[in-house]
Image: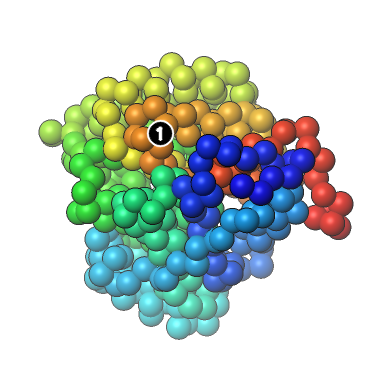
Amino acid sequence: MTTTSAATGDPTHPSGDRVVVWSPDFLDYRWGPTHPMNPTRLDLTMALSRGLGLLEGVETLRPPAATDADLLRIHTPAYVEAVKHAGNLPPGSSAGPEAPHGLGTEDNPIFPRMHEASAVLAGGTLAAAREIAAGRTRRAVSIGGGMHHAMADWAAGFCVYNDAAIAISWLLDNGFDRIAYLDVDAHHGDGVQHAFLGDPRVLTVSIHQHPATLWPNTGWSSEIGTGAAEGTAVNLPVLPGTVDALWLRAFHAVVPAAVAAFRPQIIISQCGADSHREDPLADLSLTVDGQRAAYLAMRELADRHCEGRWLAVGGGGYGLVRVVPRSWTHLIAAVLDREIDPATSIPGEWRE
């Protein structure tokens, strides 16, 4: 495996054991020039990863867009059609009276080709799931994914199609019956939890800022699943200002035991970087070092319980330059087993 002074590889695993899913089309998911979710964060992450030598010798997988059949695993036909219609409207317009399906709101404004851009993000996570299911890789990462707030018939929280839920649904139909979804975004992973709240085959774990203090105001510890799935939803709300040590203490106090008891065949991680202390939309106080520790902990759980099967996606994160690219470069490094020393200098070309 090709290595550099910044990125150190593990020679015991061939590079084919990991997949980085990437498409320039991910950058078309652009809500508008002033919207906090700016796809520049994705472009900067890939540029930093390349600048550090992290992607040398690694072929990225360019995914196809999710098909309507893929989207309909989670979303309603009326909603998919509404997204297609909205993407043909002038930017900034409303999709209709009172913004039906959550389209045309301040959080989720209309943008051109909304359906096509959203379907590519969903296709990225689905392609990663298919690579793992087919045995062509053990680990895969798609930083364009992580749209965990999207509901069956409603856009929410900058999310149109719920890529993780779509991938989980596909995996359940293709050989998997115990899937653990771990969400470390500052905001509760409500859309994925809601999709599988009554399905005992899916464990959803979310560690997030306390719902009394942050949208979507869900993810209370009393939310534990319903019916036969009671106990398969785990929520860890933490208070504003929580720092690395306290956040990691909460994670290690609950998550490893929950995963061990569930015995999953694969772990899917939503790795939103908005838990960082500089994020403008949340109030947690993690550092990039703390976020990196969370990624490594989830990888270790996949190695221990799932024969290494780990699918990591992006999510929130609105510190476009100083936070998200650094955090997710460590995420890509964790997937590739090419650890980057946190003291490594940012390349001058990237800074420019």
68 vs 126: above or below: below
Q: Is residue 198 left or right of residue 90?
A: left
Viewer-nearest residue: 223 or 102: 223
Residue at figure coordinates x 29%, y 37% from the top left? 265
- The image quarter containing residue 241 is top right
Q: Is residue 270 left or right of residue 25?
A: left
Dot 1: within a 10 Å radius of its alpha carbon, few (fewer than 14), some, or many (20 or more) residues? many
At label 1, the amino acid type is Ala
The quarter of the image holding the C terminus is: bottom right
Question: Is residue 160 shown to the viewer in this render?
Answer: no
Question: Is residue 176 shown to the viewer in this render?
Answer: yes
188 vs 349: above or below: above
Residue at the outermost left position: 228
Q: Is residue 326 left or right of residue 69?
A: right
User: What x and y, as percent, mark residue 62?
Assistant: 50, 67
Residue at figure coordinates x 78%, y 37% from the top left? 344
89 vs 10: above or below: below
**Considering the numbered disc 1 on the image, is that residue within a helix, a strand or a loop?**
helix
Question: Which residue is under mark 1?
Answer: 302
User: What x and y, as percent, mark residue 309?
Assistant: 38, 41
User: What x and y, as percent, mark residue 246?
Assistant: 56, 18
Q: Is residue 35 left or right of residue 198?
A: right
Residue at figure coordinates x 58%, y 29% from the top left? 293
